[in-house]
Image (spheres, rainbow, N blue to C red):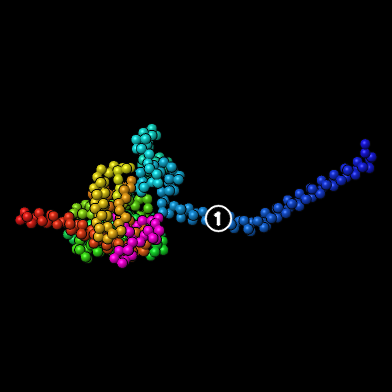
Amino acid sequence: MYCATTCRSRRTFTAAICRLLLAALLFLTIAALFLVRNVIPGVIYPKLQATIEGIPRGMLALYREDPKKILKSAIPLLEWSDFEENTTSRPAPGFFWDSLGSMVGVQLQSPLEILQSQIPHLITAETTGPDLPVDQPQKGFLPNAVPAPETTTTLTGECLVGIYNTHTGETYNRTDGLDRLEGKRGGVVTVAEALGGALEERYGIRVVRSDRIHDANYNTSYLESEKTLREMVDGHPGLKAVLDIHRDSGKTREQSLVLIDGQAAAPILIIVGSDARRPFLNWRQNYNFAVRLSDSINEMYPGLSLGVRVKDGLYNQFLHPRAILLEMGTTENSTEEAACSARFLADVLAELLAGEAAPAEESSDEAD
């Protein structure tokens, strides 16, 4: 038993401790509210706001080179569909998607039908646009862009070489400070012009060349360049070679240089499509011509050609048995280095075409 005085003292002490804790809790609450309202916003909010504002720029930078990533991240089925450009993984067997597509009523290897199944309004939309002549640009994709005047060089008589650029905006970082000129003509157009000029001026080989902008809407680049190529082939049935001039990426500066006759030049990579994803019965004709050209390049200028790479796309090469895609250097080259390679390529191409013409001339002389 405790005396009454002791009990009162213990109760008084406990009550005082409780009041002190409540006062401390109240003080901490007020201090926390003050910090949240007056101090923290000045430190945290600007950083948070800068991070939020930087998200769109980061997304644009991430998807700028390959806008299809946006669609593929939202609609994973497009990863296995039939875009012209290569996918990062091999497509699933065609019969699997055909069978599954027949069940759901959508052709799963067609990106257009997949999009139309998700956005029904697209069914009524015009997907390919009107046919345009070679010397007119596609209007309306970039309202703020002011394209340069269109020109198409078409010489009289029989043209033997056709030259164009599917990705017209591709350019060279060493010259222009960036990899692509959106809605404009990049360094690859200058390279195509150098190639055509060398063939005409040095060897008298007639060239038909188009510098029409095809990639104002990047995802329809090959649809637009198909129109140009069809017009070339239909208008010049004597074409012996058709060259789509591009530039490569993802290489170092060291990988982007080769020394030819004391001159810094850009290596050339030849791309040929195949029937891996869509029917392309005669793709080996294009491949055989590409191999012959690559071998001839390295025979005349050792190391200039990186060989022939077969990819899954068609690249409009089904329109001509000698249509090939040329990667003239990389983003780490200058435009002049790639143009130098184009002039070397003209030497090789002229010799190859002359060798093919010689037997025909000899047989004609023997008949006389």
Residue occupying the point 39% across, 64% down = 174
> Against 11, is 66 above or below?
below
Residue 277 at x, y percent in the picture: 33, 42
Q: Secondary structure at mark 1?
A: helix
Residue at coordinates 21% horizontally, 52% vertically from top-left?
234
Magenta span has 257?
A: yes
Horizontal side, residue 92 vs residue 196: left or right: right
Quadrant assignment, res 242 = bottom left
Which residue is most to the left?
Answer: 368
Closer to the camera in the image, 322 or 111: 322
Quadrant containing the N terminus is top right
90 or 313: nearer the viewer:
90
Q: Which residue is mark 1?
A: 51
* Residue nearer the viewer, 291 or 149: 291
At x 30% / y 53%, what residue is drawn?
307
Across and down, in percent, residue 292 comes to: 24, 53
Was residue 22 drawn as part of the magenta stretch in this picture? Answer: no
> Which amino acid lies under the numbered mark 1 shown in the image of this protein?
Thr
Q: Is residue 28 visible?
A: yes
Q: Position of residue 341 (x, y in %)?
A: 30, 62
The residue at the far bottom in this view is 262
Residue at image x 38%, y 39%?
A: 92
Q: Is residue 102 visible?
A: no
Q: Which residues are magenta?
A: 244-269
Q: Image quadrant of residue 327?
A: bottom left
Q: Is the residue 16 above or below the residue 192 in the image?
A: above
- The quarter of the image holding the C terminus is bottom left
Residue 198 in the image: state x and y as whole percent.
24, 64
Q: Residue farthest to the top?
A: 103
